[in-house]
Amino acid sequence: MKKQDFIKSSLILMISAVISKILGAVFKIPLTNILGGVGMSYFSCAYSLFLPVYALSVTGLSTAVAHLTAQSAVFGMYDNARKVRKTAILIFSLTGLAGSLIIYFTAKPFCTYIGDCPEAELAVKLIAPSVFFGCITAVERGYYEGLSNMYPTAFSQLAEGIVKMACGLSLCSYVVNHSEEVLAYFPPDTDIRSISASAGILGVTLSSVGSLLFFPLMKIFYHGERKISPDKTVISGKRISRELIITALPVGISAVVTNLTSLIDLGTITAIVGRNPEHYRPFADISAEDIPHFLYGSFAGVTLTVFNLIPSVTNMLGKGILPSVTEAWESRDRKSLEKNTHQALLVSLFISAPSAIGMGILAEKILMFLYSGQPDEVSASVSPLQYLMPGMVFLCVSFPVFSMLQAIGKPSIPLKIMIAGTLIKLCGNLILIPLMSINGASLSTTISYLFILVSSLVIYLKATQIKLHFTKFIPILYSSVFCGISAWIADTQLSPYLSSNQSMFISTATGAVVYMGILSLVKKLE
């Protein structure tokens, strides 16, 4: 089987992620415009319970299968790689089933006592099956990623995005447009927004089915992994199971800790704001009773949706770098290890730094373009998004560092770092939200991501004994500053004469051209 190097692997996954994010935006942005801030709080409440369980069951699994498969591939043990896949499917399909049942049966107490949002119960129950389907999909993706073949992961992500967009929006729109017919099947006091949010969530569940179905369809036409193995050595199923669990569990728990931030935001924003809703920024069309859910829904449904656009793309660098770093580490090739490390960090910074500066400067116009039908939600989200922009850079660069720690056999390190980062996030929310409203939630997130990046990078460099040449990063940072300055100047000069959207697009293009031009010039002068 022809392998893909780090750059090609990452490029495949990032292109897929960009397309998936576009599809996701086409799903999430109209959904927010349909549901509004309060309706999105019901949708986000379901996600807040779903994500930690999904992360524990699924996230570490893909990494573990990819890691063990990559180890087998280094020594030509392709029979053993296939056994890793079969063993993982057997073990983690049961894990996924357990996760789905946990979400389903804890839906009511979670929504009532933690989320203070009983209207989200149906949405939580409808998203529960996604964990089961996600586990099996993660095994399939991890298997091919370990063989340095990123195409199956890329195409399954596309299938997931297409189904989510098509089913989620059509179901949600149907409920809104036929509200009287739909409400006839529910108790008289049911909020139509909770049913609409549940319909959107059902699209997410159906997308997990679509992503899984891609793999059996692919195997009808593709048989590349069935080539004869030069090494017939096969490790026992018991040992494979143990290695999978040892590798997956710390990564999964780390992902749980990461996703606990959504629970922290849900609990702290609604609780703190709910004590004195009149103290927080008033909105003419929002009642005091709805202010806590409105602010949380705006933060989770608008601010974090836009914030996650770039990290979801650079996250693919972690998947792309894992096989290359694993091979370099197992082969004791320090030169390749250092080269791959620099490549991963540079590409992350190359994408995230100018994006963060540009999005921070043009935050209001970007949000108005995406959520033109929700001016109150946009007004509540501009400042929080700007506070999150430095954190976006820290998060993007930390993704490949975490994957590299896992590749060198230290999967528990990210867990410890994430636990500390989550505690910082919790303390930050409790201190800052009373002072800064949801801006405080954004600032505490940025501070926690800074801690996470610095800690993980220091530990990785110490463990591998490689040197990081920080001068390599200066041209990107220097060019990113000029990207932001040029975008700001263009926007300032054009705004009096052009529409908001026209000014935004031209300013964005100006910043991008200046960024690439100055970066090319600086690189030539080195």
Image (tube, rainbow, N blue to C red):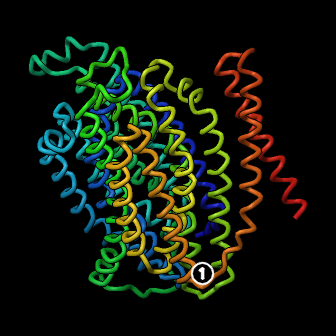
Q: Residue at x 49, y 34 (%)?
A: 25
In this picture, residue 395 sits left or right of residue 119 = right
Q: Residue 39, relative to residue 100: is it above or below?
A: above
Q: Position of residue 43 (x, y in %)?
A: 30, 34
Query: Residue 202: in sight, yes or no?
Result: no
Q: Position of residue 198 (x, y in %)?
A: 26, 31
Q: Residue furthest right?
A: 525
Q: Residue 40, relative to residue 217: is it above or below?
A: above
Question: Is 12 in front, or is 252?
Answer: 252
Question: Is 134 in front, or is 365?
Answer: 365
Q: Residue at x 64, y 44 (%)?
A: 357
- What's the residue type where badge 1 is placed? Ala
In this picture, residue 331 sits left or right of residue 478 = left
Q: Position of residue 22 (x, y in %)?
A: 54, 37
Q: Residue at x 57, y 83 (%)?
A: 464
Question: Is 462 in front, or is 194?
Answer: 462
Pointer 1: what residue? Answer: 328
